[in-house]
Amino acid sequence: MELWPLIKNILILDSEGKRIAVKYYSDDWPTNAAKEAFEKSVFTKTQKTNARTEAEITMFDDYIVVYKFVQDLHFFVTGGENENEIILAAVLQGFFDAVGLLLRGTVDKKEALENLDIILLCIDEIVDGGIILETDANVIAGKVASHSMDAGAPLSEQTITQALATAREHLTRSLLK
């Protein structure tokens, strides 16, 4: 048994079960075909449920899958059969809320595809190598926004967090000269 909770994968699928953004942290699915088969079967099992208002939890092939739907996107977080469902749900909710913040409330397939880089950064800020780093949506969104911020943007167009990051960067550069 592991000392800390591990995430097996994080998935965003569209309303037809096709990949939008996926990240696997486990060798349980060694090939791309195995990954796609897992995605298809988990989508088929969950598509008839109503997971729009709050997350749902299901056991699937010795994995715990926590999922939530919005518009035409399906969000999934998978853990091992011995993982804590509440922790997996917290990861899902943090991811879901951070994506909502970063996409300014317009969470749909078109926006997700246009901002795929932001979503992938979001996944990277939440989980690294299967280990959970952060579940607070505001912290995740702040870190992603500081990574994806255009450093040349005027300060009036930046959020407070972005402006502070820019100021810190300028201060660091000036001290290192």
Image (cartoon, rainbow, N blue to C red):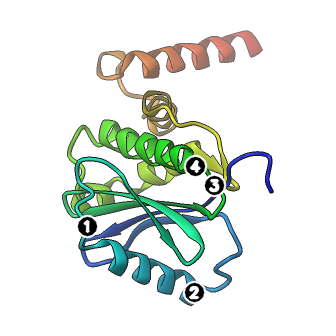
Q: Mark 1 — residue? A: 49
Amino acid residing under circle 3: Glu
Q: Separation of disc 4 and disc 2 at Cα?
A: 22 Å
Q: Earlier in the sequence, mark 3 or mark 2?
A: 2
The image shows a total of numbered marks equal to 4
Q: Mark 2 — residue? A: 34
Amino acid residing under circle 1: Thr
Task: Check residue 124 in the rendering and tell me which mark sits there, or answer none.
Answer: 4
Q: What element carries label 3?
A: loop
Viewer-side label of 4, 2? 2
Quarter-of-image position of residue 97: top left
- Asked if disc 4 and disc 2 are in contact, CB closer than 8 Å, the reply is no
Q: Horizontal and vertical percent for residue 87?
A: 56, 44
Q: 171 left or right of 65?
A: right
Q: Is mark 1 on a helix, strand or loop?
A: loop
Q: In this view, does 142 lie above or below 33?
A: above
Q: What element carries label 4?
A: helix
Q: Mark 3 — residue? A: 83
Towards the viewer: 65 or 125: 65
Q: Earlier in the sequence, mark 3 or mark 4?
A: 3
Q: Horizontal and vertical percent for residue 139?
A: 49, 28
Q: Which of marks 3 and 1 is nearer the N terminus?
A: 1
Q: Which of marks 4 and 2 is nearer the N terminus?
A: 2
Q: Horizontal and vertical percent for residue 74?
A: 32, 63
Q: Separation of disc 3 and disc 1 at Cα?
A: 22 Å
